[in-house]
Image: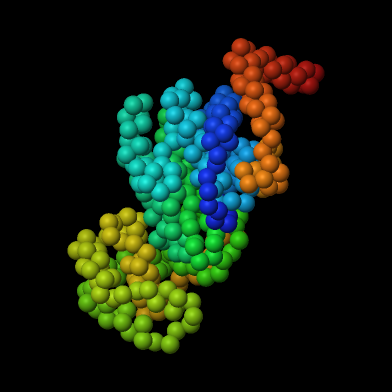
Amino acid sequence: MRRTGTANLPLHGGRAPRWLFERMTRLAGAILTYMVEEMGPGETVYRFSDSYWFQSLGCVLGFDWHSSGVTTTTCGAVKEALSGRKDLGIFAAGGKGAASRRTPQEIEEQAGRIGLGGAENLVYASRMSAKVDNNALQDGYQIYHHFFLFTDRGEWTVVQQGMNEASGYARRYHWASRGLRDFVEEPHAAICAENHGVAMNLVASFSAETRRAMVGLCGENPHKLTLQLEGLKRLELPRRHQLFLQHLHPDSVKRVLLKTYERQPEDFAVLLGMPGVGAKTLRALALISELVHGTALSWEDPARYSFAHGGKDGYPYPVDRETYDRSIEIMEKAIKRSRCGERDREEALRRLSRVAGDF
């Protein structure tokens, strides 16, 4: 499993006007149809895991290039465009707020309708990607948007976004099933966002020792761990540790530690996926492991666009409706031509050209 990119965007309010969203949906549908015909559902879905490509898609559809809304609105338009389109072999679930919480149900329903087995694996991927970016990577962003895209062969990507109200920014995370990796060991392949300072990164390779120690701590008496946590809160520690200790309440953490003590998780992925184990519990275990037992823990924040139709708020210029409608018309005509054999003829000419080049 790997996360293939991250992007930071300023938080903007408001929503896309109906006239723009309807055009975004039509153009998104035309683009996806063309892409599926050219490269297949799997490659089309995989493109969504590239944060630069996704940003470009949002810009082509006419939304703000630097707004947090480019994520939610682009995903919304794509989901609307895919609704009822079984022929493409691509399906969308989730969205913003309450819609994100319906993701597992939507995955199971759509997988059932097309007879796709292994829906539980898709649901697991959805839940774990959110768990990692919300809890295992504590960078100050709370996930509020979760978009899950999958094919009729079980390939998938996740586009999710977190909010940091203090900084006024949102951060977008991309995941892909291609190139399967461990959920909890360096899940990202590329980072393209501004670094915002200290972050507790439990999925960094540098944190492997701490992850193992945290699992071991779950086998110790919760009362002992609580006493260790109380001791840490009384020590004079570097600022970065104080930041992560100040919101920990040993008594509330102890209640969750009692559950982990009874369950005895066998590895970090199981611990991360346990009900009730959230950011505070993981933070308590990680800090005890690092500061009391001396294990290595990463504090590095892992996070380090062309317009075709203008932007919703008039930047860099207002959306040109005439040009937008013309773009939709061109895309839809191209799709019709490809279905009439135009693509086969062009492919034959390319093959002929390659053969001719060999003589």
Left or right? Give the position of 48 relative to 323: left
Extreme residue toward the left, this view: 262
Give the residue at x 36% y 86%: 234
38 to the left or right of 185: right
Q: Is residue 79 above or below residue 334?
A: below
Point 22% across, 74% down: residue: 221
Total number of numbered discs in the rendering = 0
Q: What colouring style does the render use?
A: rainbow
Outermost residue toward the top in this view: 340
Vertical comparison of 295 with 346: above or below: below
From the viewer's perspective, tell me whether residue 243 is left or right of residue 322: left
Q: Position of residue 140 (x, y in %)?
A: 47, 64
Image quadrant where residue 21 sits: top right
Residue 183 rendering spot, x and y as whole percentages: 42, 52
Q: Residue at x 69, y 35 (%)?
A: 320
Left or right relative to 149: residue 336: right
Q: Quadrant of the C terminus?
A: top right
Foreground residue among 139 and 95: 95
Q: How far across and down, in percent of the image, does residue 200 sit?
A: 46, 68
Task: Name the residue rendered at 28%, 60% in the picture.
Answer: 276
Q: Position of residue 84 (x, y in %)?
A: 43, 25
Quarter of the rendering containing residue 92: top left
**Is residue 123 in sight in this rendering?**
no
Q: Is residue 83 visible?
A: yes
Q: Nearer the viewer, residue 92 or 272?
A: 92
